[in-house]
Image (tube, helix red, strand yellow):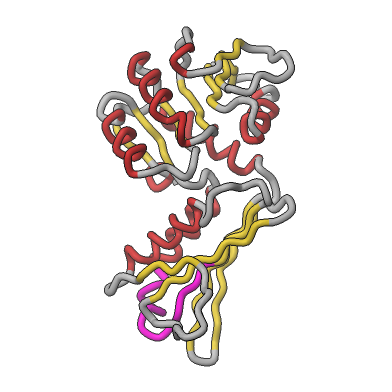
Amino acid sequence: MLNIILHGCNGKMGKTLQEIISKEPDLNILAGIDQNISDPLPFKLYMSPLDCEVKADVVIDFSHHSAIKDLLEYCVRMKVPVVIATTALGDEDLELIQQASEVIPIFRTANMSIGINALSRMLKHAVPVFEEDFNVEIIEKHHHKKVDSPSGTALLLANSINEACTKKKDYLYGRHSKNDQCKITDLGIHAVRGGTIPGEHTVIFAGPDEVIELTHRVYSKSVFALGALKAAKFLVTKNSGLYSMEDMV
């Protein structure tokens, strides 16, 4: 039995995880952490990680970047591995994660989808073929309630492209100039928000007289929940350190 603490248990991803875990006999939610107190839950609810008094096998985090510091403090104190799926993390957050990973196992990725991480690998192989003559653009689409843009996944894909480039590209967030011509060194990143789109990312390689598009679409948030659970099972077997999808896929 894998005992789990859900950090952000009353958010959309937290509720999706609750539903999936309830159907898995080898998984159990020991406690939840969320500032939003909703209907009664079948497990103990804490408003802050610092209030949490129980120790689980692993914490799964789908919350807000502002809560990362307190979450890491709890996990380090209790020696609990943590899967961090929260996005929009700043440099200070990443530094705290790096420091905590010296004490506990931490799994962090900008996207819990196996497909997105496979696409990231594919891009690294594609870039050397297209780098010299093709412009590269990324378009990401999400629901109207997503507050950060561009998405962490768009940046993950952009970084994968740049890592494979012999000459690093300059990220260009949107286009709104009347005079600037697209340069081969540009990597345009564009965000669309609307409706209930769970997530869509398209990488465009546009060259002389031909265009190649690689698109990943998500049709349900369960994709991310299943990826997080797979990461949790992976992480509890590991020693302290910082892990990502590249270590698991």
Span highlighted in magenta in the image: 125-138
Q: Does the magenta segment cover residue 11? A: no
Q: Is residue 29 left or right of residue 239?
A: right
Query: Which residue lies at the image location 37% right of the left edge and 32% below the top edge?
Result: 106
Q: Is residue 1 left or right of residue 238?
A: right
Give residue 29's position: percent from left, percent from top. 59, 18
Residue 129 sits above or below residue 224 on the image:
below
Residue 153 sits above or below residue 133 on the image:
above
Q: Does the magenta segment cover residue 133? A: yes
In which quadrant of the rendered view does residue 105 lie? top left
Give residue 129's position: percent from left, percent from top. 39, 78
Q: Which residue is at the far top?
A: 53
Query: Which residue lies at the image location 57% right of the left edge and 27% below the top edge?
Result: 8
Give residue 116's position: percent from left, percent from top. 52, 54
Give residue 121's position: percent from left, percent from top. 43, 59
Residue 241 sits above or below residue 165 on the image:
above
